Amino acid sequence: MNSELIPLMVVFPLISAILLNLMHGKDRAVRVYGTLAMVVVIAVPLLAVYGNHLFGAHPAIDTPAETGIALGRINLAIEYSFGFLQRALIFLLAAIATFAVLSHTSNEKRASGVYLSMVMLSIAAVSAVVMANDIFNMFVFLEILTISQAAMVVAKGDIGGYKAALKYLIFGGVAGGAILLGIALLLGTFGVLNITDLGNALSGNTKSPIVLTAVGLLVIGWLFESGLFPFHTIKSHIYSSAKADVAALLQTETKIVLVAIAIILLRLFGGLSNMSAVMVGLSVITLAFGSVMALVQTDFRRLLAFAAVGQAGLVGIGLSLGTPDGIAASIFHAVNDALAMSLLFVTVFVIYEGAKTTEFSRLGGLLTKAPRLAFLQIIGIMAVSGVPPFNAYQSEYRLIGAAFQAGYPELGVVIILGTIVTFVALMKGFFLTFLKESTAVAAIGRPQLSNALPLVTFATMVILALVCLGIGLHPGPLYDRFADVAITLTMGV
Amino acid sequence: MNPFGVLVIGAVIGAVLGLSVTSEFFNRKTYVTILGVAVLIDVLMGSYPFYTWDLSVELPVSGVYLAALIGMLAGKAAGGR
Amino acid sequence: MNTKDIYEMRTVVAAVFLGIFSIFVLKALTSFEIIPGVSYVYNLQGPSIAPNMITVILFDWRGYDTLGEAFILITAVFTTGILFGRGVLGGDVKVRDTAATRQPSVVQKVFAAPLVFIIVAFGIVITLGGHITPGGGFQGGSVIATAFFLSVVVFGLRKNVFSLSHRSLETFEGVGALIYLCLGLAGLGLSGYYLYNVGADFYPGLGVAQWAVNLLSYPDATNAGIIPYLNIGIALKVLSGFCTIITVLMGAEKK
């Protein structure tokens, strides 16, 4: 069924990006339009009807024999499909992006139209990647995503951000090239770009060297975009160089893109056990490296960045298993972790704003200064590391169950170990910031954290904490529908 | 149907770009050079880019090119910077 | 083993892996048989829209991808602006304009200014002929931008043939992108499909109003519908994007 609101989820942010850039310099216009645009961005995925959208109205046709395509019918147009999964992921993205935009418009003295237009471009890009049923379209918007993410880091305006963004763009170029080459090989061999068609053409045809090379190249792209093993340092570098509200947005986008591309890979090459094994292996390595690297950091932002990367590995494990339970649990964990990690990033942002540093050697004894912040942060830590009343507990528990059910009990053990290490690392950060007696803070001027907490930031943290708690207490409504999505996905494989 | 609209569009784009041209580097010789070279290029282009004209003879010059050039000159004259 | 040795070892390991990977890719490419695929259908149906098949595929079937490609360029231009201080958080960083006015030689002085006119007119022809002959918005826009480059290289940034401010370049870019986006929205509003080629009305069953078809059909016997307008939007966007980048790069101060 054709739904007319589907393209607006991408096109409206693009239009807003152009307008915000034109408004740059007119402070009031930027603030008002940026806030109003986010209302629309949140509303459209909720109002849109489930269905498909064909760009340019070109229908599916019976395949002429001369094309050489081994399918009865092919799609001519670029196709977007929109279902519950897409709605949930885009709504999550829009919500976190709204917090980033509001925190910008309310905390900055001068609103930057260019920066907000970059936020809009990244929203559009992620929405497109999530909905795209066309592999080339996915690539195009991944490129926009990479550049706009780098730009958001650069916008902070310090030399560390420049370095991180440059590295990110160089690796992004390599990964983008890998994806494009993989797509070119698939297009040349099978003649179609539509993912549903390509999946049908590929079924039972996955052992030729061309296909294996394409799988390798696409997996490289997936690893970069989701910050998994060989690229985990660059991703964590990007997170820790950004402002914390940007970092919260970046890690949300990364987890959504991880889920989206992994689902595309599963739809295309679901029958390929080698790919699954490689993906599981790299995800496990990411989980181990991310968590252990988090343990040894001396800076709270870098610690969080590595913890976020480690959790991405956790998401990757379930998706790579390819079983309905694993996929459902992974998507669920991606949503939960994006929420909880955003909460943690915002709390650290507040510490940074107050104390102008997040190095542990210069922090300490903040508990008496900012008890509300400490309370919210401990909620975030418990939520991220899967302590029972909170949301990640529900998804990690289901992930471990899925690993057992898929016949890999070892993976369950790895997940538990990774979670414990993450918890220890985050608690270390909490202890060194809030509990440890320190005189160092006195030297840099006592931060008035509890007084200086802006309303938007505080409301953001409280809402995120409540959502974490709410999903933890009632996981059913969300998880059951993810499970339906996963079952539909694996039926097609 | 003759594509006169193309000439209009070409002239408009030319005029928009011509509006921002400064007069400092132009004198009568420059304009003579422009027109001379433009007519030469136009003849060499022939009917490129091959719009279909309902005329008894095939058009020997590229109308769009001339329109764009005239539009630019007009825009420059109107801009007057 | 000190740090330098580790870096050297890392390079060697990377080279070995790259070699192995290249062998796999080359082996795959030797067994690569290309089939016509979906482009056969495009080529079959395309001539009924416009003669230049590349433009028809680029702006009709894959028009939405082209929108994305255009936005890659836009994003890159914005990012270049941010790198040089425009839109950095906490207020713009003003880059001091140090680009001195250059003293052109006699030959440059005589030929550069007329050449600018001739190149711009040629760029417009390429843009407007994009649906008939090789060319189009990307190419035409780049050609027009070279005229600006020439003028900047010969006369310097401050005082050259074009007095294009950063603000007007932004406006051009915004207008170009909005032309593309809004033509897509017109298709969405009139037929229910984004970027439907309203002017050509390829699928009359969608019930697009006749006035809209007449309004957006291009004044030309080879009726390409909205494709030439999309080309114009892309041309504006590409030329202003390139001009913005060169303005920013030429105006930047060495630190």
Image: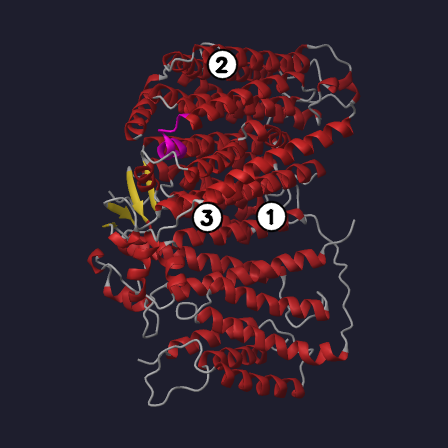
Amino acid on which the number 3 mark rests in the picture: Leu
Is A85 a magenta residue? no
State which quarter of the image contains the N terminus of chain A: top left
Residue A26 image position (x, y, % from top left): 58, 51
Q: Is residue A265 above or below residue B59?
A: above
Q: Main secondary structure of the magenta part?
A: helix
- Position of the C terminus of chain A by quadrant: top left
Residue A168 vertical position relative to residue C161 in the rendered view, above or below: above
Determine whether A207 is above or below C87 in the image: above
Q: Residue A429: image x %, image y %?
A: 64, 16
Question: In this rendering, which labeled residue sits more in front, label 1 or label 2?
Answer: 2
Q: Do the residues at pointers 2 and 3 share their chain?
A: yes
Q: Name the outermost residue toward the left.
A: C205
The residue wearing badge 2 is A415
Q: Amino acid at mark 1?
A: Thr
In the shown orientation, is residue A119 left or right of residue A493? right
Boundaries of the magenta span:
A264-273
Q: Give the residue displayed 51% in from the left and 60% down from the top.
A: C237
- Mark 2 and mark 3 lie on one chain; the one further toward the N terminus is 3
- Per the image, is A266 magenta? yes
**From this viewpoint, which residue is outermost toward the bottom?**
B56
Residue B15 x %, y %: 52, 75
**Alpha-carbon span between mark 1 and mark 3:** 15 Å
Q: Give the chain of mark 2.
A: A
Q: Which residue occupies 56% across, 12% down?
A: A423
Q: Are marks 1 and 3 on the same chain?
A: no
Q: Which circle marks residue A14 in the picture?
A: 3
Q: Which residue is disc 1 drawn over?
A: C79
**Pointer 2 and pointer 3: residues touching (CB < 8 Å)?**
no
Q: Say which of marks 1 and 3 sits in front.
A: 1
Q: Which mark is residue A118?
A: none
Residue at disc 2, secondary structure: helix
